[in-house]
Amino acid sequence: MKKLFVLNTIALLLLLTCSATVKAEDDVVFRALSDEMARSCSRLKLKEHGPPFYLGYTVTESDTMHLSAAFGALSGDGKNRWRRLTVDLRVGDYNLDSSKATERLYMPWDWSGDYESTEKDSTVTADDDYDSIRHTAWLQTDSAYKKAVESLGEKKDYLERSSVIERPPDLSKEKPAELIQPLQKLNVSRDKWRQTIRRISTIFRDYPGVETSEVESTCSADNRWFLNNEGFKNRTGSKSAHIIASAAARAKDGMWCCDCEVLHAARSDELPDAELLEKKTRDLAARVVAMSNAPLVDDYIGPVLFEGTSAASLVQAVAPFFGCSHESNWDKNANSYAPLREQKNVLKKKLGKKIASRSLTIVDDPLTPEFNGVSLMGGYSVDDEGVVAQKLTLVDKGVLQTFCMSRVPTRNLKQSNGHARGHYGRTSIVYVQPEQTATPAELRSKLIELGKEEGLEYVLVVKKMASYRTYSMSRSATLFDPFTWSYKGDPSELVLLPPVELFKVNVATGKEELVRGAVFTNPTLRMLRDIVALGDDKKAYTLPERSDDVASVVTPSILVREAELKRPVSEEEKPPLIPNPYFEAKQAK
Amino acid sequence: MSSAKLATLVAALVLSQLPARADSSQIMKTMETELQRSFAKLKNAGAAPLYFLAYRLYDEDEQKISGHYGALNSGLRSSHSRYLKVEVRVGSPESDNTHKIRGKYFYENYASLSAIPVTQENDEAALRYCLWLKTDDAFKKAQEKYRQVKVNKAVKAEDEDAADDFSHESSRIYEEPGSTFKVDASGWLDRVKRLSAIYKNFPNIQDSDVTLTAEKTRRYIVSSEGTKIEDERVQYRFVTTAESKAEDGMKLWLYDGLELPSVVEMPGEQKLESMVTRVAESVEALRKAPKVEPYAGPAILRGRAAAVFFHETFGHRIEGHRQKDEDEGRTFTRKLGQLVMPSFITVIDDPCRQKIGNTSLNGYYKFDDEGIPAQKVVLVDHGILKSFLMSRSPVKGFPNSNGHGRCSPFYYEPAARQGNLIVESSKVVPYATLRQMLIDEAKKQGKPYGLIFDEIAGGFTFTSALALQAYKLMPLRVLKVFTDGRPDELLRGANIIGTPLQSLEQIIAAGDDVETFNGTCGAESGDVPVSASSPSLLLKTIEVERQEKDYDKPPLLPAPLFDDQTKNKHPRSEGAARNTGGKRERDAGNSSSDRRERKESAGRSTDTNNSGKDAHKDSGKSGTRAGDGHRNGRQDKKGKLDQ
């Protein structure tokens, strides 16, 4: 009996294998999902509750190689391929559906936790296996349906007892898009990457002034399947690779001076140029050492010139304010039919109004893959809800034109503009377009002129700001308190990271001096109105985002009439009691 | 088991460690050099003298293959990780920084973790760079803690147990040659797929999983006392889990598995197939079983359940350091030389023992994580308490370690832990007699039935004085044995609850069978591999409570493979149904001996702030498949929730 059973199973398995090969030309993932979708949309219902009116499946596949190295040897070496299935199931109708804002705790270090939400999320087999994928989809859809029915009930109760004025509909109707891109595979030479990361990390052995350093790389091939019952069907694939080198040095008083360099090869998994990589890493090491030897700066109020990459950091900090669309309009926790994050957005009621200097135009363009021959990160053809990406003018000559929208309408904007990223309306690649430009020399002289007007002895130039990566690599290098960061997409206040490369410019002599130890105090969006001039040096910069991603910003240097900087109040732990053994041995020789 | 078949399988594809990591003695040399430099330079660098410094490096290679419903989750996953622990002691062995700060929250006694990445390669400069940073960090924290200890001692009442903080031991030098670590990847990829496809024959199985994990951990220990240990532990683990939901919403799951020290001991595919099939069938059977009613009365704990019972009621309470910790319940501290259980019971803990019968024991080791040779300890001799499990943290009357200072490779300091706990009975009866004794005892007590517990998920206990001195066991399968001769009835949803001293006194008789529970035990020094072995035990009274309940209905639609209404019906669903019908029904009352070893977690921890919900939530965020998440949750519950 037992033997018979075994034989039987093997025979059945063979049958399965054959059928899978025969149908290889159509996509197994789509097939499994659409079969389960068809069944669910007609038969998944309870006595008093109908089937879902909206059902969307997303499968994200990620094949990632992550390497890291410290002081010349690998400290992390992993490769991981997985697929995840997300089910977005809604009951009700477009006007009133079961969606609600994610109930999550305020945890700035956690960007990805899946808590109670409209969506169900789970790992699905990375094999193209019809039965396994469909079985997982079945269980996730079932669970999502039950949650949706409960959630719609709660929402109706809420509307019954609350006075919601001009309630926007819950989901916009959009034109279905079908886009099928070839699947991407990660074809990297792991050994070559290992060698590179190791080699770059070894560079820090030439810098006794650097206390801790880290080099990490991430290469990934990502594929995404999206399918819903409205006829949206797309499959997109992309590849990317980037290296981040970070270094920290310690000033005599114990203050950490940290910085990082990001190098990327967008839309491919090639290695960045070796020579450039080495040069950037050496510059980084020299920079943090120089910073650690620089004098402390005093508290300051006055004009500030954001030069080069620091202008990009400023733009990155402003960007979250341009997202006004959220995963759902109903925020049960906030007891409101407008999510807290939307309510808090100071730009919420500013559509059509002047929010910035007339010289400023801001464009968001996910569709253009490069700028002046430099490839850009953060672009896409269809957004996370399958809607075709659009180029937007967010600010036109200082006037706010629109927000980045998902399919969740707000009171003012009813349609998506293809900017749903993780179901939030978010910016992609942001371009600052100056209406008038100034040469670097003109910017400097304007800066000095403003300083003189204020009666200042010196003015400040920020060349580089800290990034969301910088803090993590040194042990206690909390240049700023991570608890004060506001949540991703929470535009309640402007968060400007501290400058890492900061210069004092003497207004009398024009002499420039590197200084350290200042943080921005209470910056606000008023800074956009205070823009005095924009440079003619427009360039693309790629910065780490708060999540693990990197994104590009194209901007010229920006001169602001007034910003306030102060010395941080916290004290630092003492440097190590004994020297790094490597440098000790080297010195002994 | 067919060894010829296995030999050919192993030859198919061999994955071995990277050559870059082969030169292991270089690691020892580097660690020693940096240890000596740090020790010399830091000795008098702080207010309190540095008197002990040890480095422990764990180099872990893991290969994992897991399957779901006939497909692989993500192929073969290989990972290599290193964990480095720096132990710094300042002050003197009589009084040092590790002394417990009394009257503070538990976490104030543990140093916070430093996030210094550990080099994965055998590069001298890079390894010394991490040792340097970690030592500096640990040294500063030790100085700070020592100051707190001194202040605490000054303001608090005298310690009840004035034992030293660190025992004097002689140093050890031991080097074990590296073994080859082979997983027949291609063979196992297919095998796991095939085995996971068995669940496709069962209409009510929701989540399911089949996983093979092979793990090699090479350990390097050097200390300022001259101890040098380099050894290794290899483990192969096969686990399968299946989950379903009863009509009333109760979540039901079962699992089975093997933990083996070598792949050669892994049974052939047929045996694994029957293991998976049995899990699936049992889950289906549980769906139909009635729920348990709260009950107190006689019961048999089958071998593995009895073993977990001892691990929780007794094992955790005789861990040495708990005897001097005044926040602990200290149930047995003053009971040395006294009768603490029936006189026919003897309990030992013997990490030196590799096997009982044919079963490999999971708690086998030669040296503990403090570099002390493992020793067999007689804990209870014919009912009389004789000794405690000792690390290098002495207690009154026990100035030395007996080789039970253990920790997980993660960020924990060693503490006294169990290894292979073995319960022996000088008076045994055949199992059939034990079963009859259960019926007789039930009649005597005027109860309509007695209970038999066989499958068990694990358990937990509280040893802290703040909490109830209680334990809980989570049986997966319970049988009602009626006094009037009706056939046994399978039940679901039971937990065993009790208090340690009272429960140990309830043992009436033991069977002539011995079963081993191989698993992982979680406590304040992390998860460590352990085993517990025991004969089946008849207890005069045991109390059973209802399990917590879920409320979700079972899925509204049938599983796609079993949906008759689906037009493009899968060709396999009919054949599958036939198969199910054709399989033998297992006698639920008699567990066969080939499934004695499982991956189980049974343990405790002093972490009084962790709640079960937290543990579950953590696991839910893990990147594994949803089912894994739940299962991790359970293991977390067992490992970390244990309080």
Image (spheres, coloured by chain):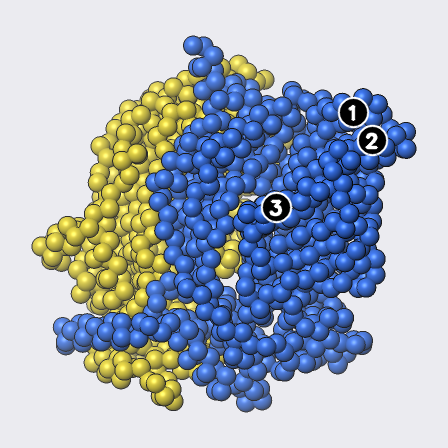
Chain colours: A blue, B yellow
Q: Residues within 10 Å of mark 1 (few under 14, many from 20)?
A: some
Q: Which quarter of the picture shows residue A381? A: bottom right
Q: Nearer the viewer, residue B133 or A246?
A: A246
Residue placed under numbered mark 2 in the picture: A448
Whether residues under marks 2 and 1 lie with C-beta atoms below 8 angstroms apart, the answer is yes
Could you give the CA–CA distance between mark 1 and mark 3, rounded to whole angstroms?
28 Å
Residue at 19% from the left image edge and 62% from the top image edge: B269
Q: Which numbered disc, 2 or 1, marks the residue that appears first in the sequence?
A: 2
Where B497 sits versus A248, above or below? below
Is there any visible trace of residue A525 in the rendered image?
no
Q: Residues within 10 Å of mark 2 (few under 14, many from 20)?
A: many
Name which residue type carries label 3: Ala
In the rendered image, which quarter contains the N terminus of chain A? bottom left
Residue at 33% from the left image edge and 22% from the top image edge: B29
Q: Nearer the viewer, residue B345 or A206?
A: A206
Q: Which element carries disc 1, helix, strand or loop?
A: loop
Q: Which mark is residue A510?
A: 1
Residue A287's spot in the image, x, y percent?
Answer: 60, 27
Same subunit: marks 2 and 1:
yes
Q: What chain letter is assigned to the residue under label 3? A: A
Residue placed under numbered mark 3 in the picture: A540
Name which residue type carries label 2: Ile
Name which residue type carries label 1: Gly
Residue A121's spot in the image, x, y percent?
Answer: 50, 66
Where B495 sits versus B259, above or below? below
Q: What chain letter is assigned to the residue under label 2? A: A
In the rendered image, which quarter contains the C terminus of chain A? top left
